[in-house]
Amino acid sequence: MDLAQLKRDYHDRITFVGGVDLNVLEAGTTEKTKEFAEYLLETLGLIGYIFGSSNSVTPNVIPENLKAMVQTLSEYNKKGMIPEKKRENK
């Protein structure tokens, strides 16, 4: 599926959840994990998207990859990609 097209077509009707491929978290590099996370965040944003792994975090997940996933989200937030109004409500 084309996530960008789905977001354009259904942004106000559905919420996307997860998406960071468990195979990448278990066997990929930290760079690949960051690239995958960045793609999802840039494509889906954080309005109408709950960022996370595709379905779980298993014992096989490489800790550095999980950390890279979370750091990517943190960096995305620091860039101001979440509207100020949303940040203030936390």
Image (tube, rainbow, N blue to C red):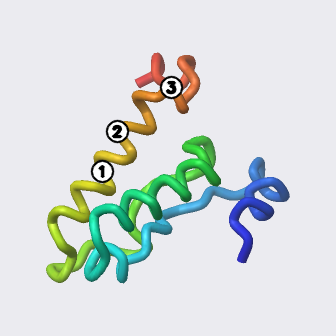
Residue 20 at what x, y percent from top left? 43, 67
Q: Earlier in the sequence, mark 2 or mark 3?
A: 2
Q: Which residue is mark 2?
A: 74
Q: Which residue is mark 1?
A: 70
Q: Which residue is mark 3?
A: 80
Residue drawn at (26%, 72%), measured in percent from left and top?
Answer: 57
Q: Residues within 10 Å of mark 1 (few under 14, many from 20)?
A: some
Residue drawn at (17%, 62%), measured in percent from left and top?
Answer: 64
- Which one is in front, 29 or 71? 29
The reply to whether callout 2 and callout 1 are in contact (CB within 8 Å) is yes
Residue 87 at what x, y percent from top left? 47, 23
Element carrying mark 2: helix
Above or below, 84 against 6 in this view is: above
Task: Identify residue type, mark 3.
Answer: Gly
Cα distance in 3D space between marks 1 and 3: 16 Å
Task: Identify residue type, mark 1.
Answer: Val
Element carrying mark 3: loop
Residue drawn at (73%, 60%), measured in percent from left and top?
Answer: 4
